[in-house]
Amino acid sequence: SIDIAIVIIVTQGSELNNYQTALYSVECYATQHGYSSRVESDDKFEECSRHEDKLFRRHCHTHQMMTREIPENAYVLFIDADVGVVNPNKFV
């Protein structure tokens, strides 16, 4: 099987309730297809804090996750927190 991780990085202090419907749909989709899903704040890795722009921090964070925590042979789908699943019958 193929190891797929759906990764969502949010800006520290973001109100996750604003994205709850989308996040729930991604979590259910990941569970349905055997993918892992991760929602993390962009302040986890100290080396990414030097980036003032939130987009750079999010990409830095994803890079650190891929380097340290996600298996090398895994695929990563990096999406925004406001992206919801429209058709759960389609595969990544």
Image: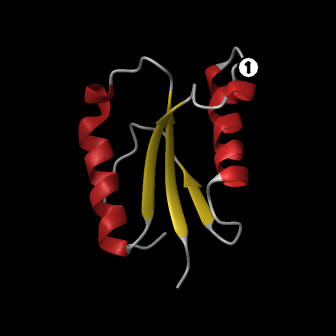
Is residue 1 positioned above or below 66 on the image? below
- Compared across the picture, whether 34 is left or right of 78 comes to left
Is residue 51 positioned above or below 10 on the image? above
Q: Please, which residue is most extreme toward the top here?
A: 52
Q: Position of residue 52 (x, y in %)?
A: 70, 14
Is residue 45 positioned above or below 72 on the image? above
Q: Position of residue 85 (x, y in %)?
A: 33, 55
* Residue situated in front as seen by the camera: 66 or 23: 66
Q: Secondary structure beneath disc 1?
A: loop
Instruction: Find disc 1 in the rendering and name its residue.
Output: 51
Q: Position of residue 13 (x, y in %)?
A: 42, 17
Give the image's coloring scheme: secondary structure
Q: Residue 16's image quarter?
A: top left
Q: Position of residue 2 (x, y in %)?
A: 55, 79
Q: Residue at x 53, y 68 (%)?
A: 4
Q: Residue at x 43, y 73 (%)?
A: 91
* Residue situated in front as seen by the camera: 91 or 2: 2
Q: Residue at x 24, y 41 (%)?
A: 21
* Residue situated in front as seen by the camera: 31 or 53: 31
Please name the amino acid that badge 1 sits on: His
Is residue 62 positioned above or below 50 on the image? below
Q: Residues within 10 Å of mark 1 (few under 14, many from 20)?
A: few
* Residue situated in front as seen by the camera: 21 or 62: 62
Q: Residue 86's image quarter?
A: bottom left
Q: Please, which residue is most extreme toward the bottom here?
A: 1
Residue 89 appears in the rendering: no
Residue 62 appears in the rendering: yes
Q: How many marks?
A: 1
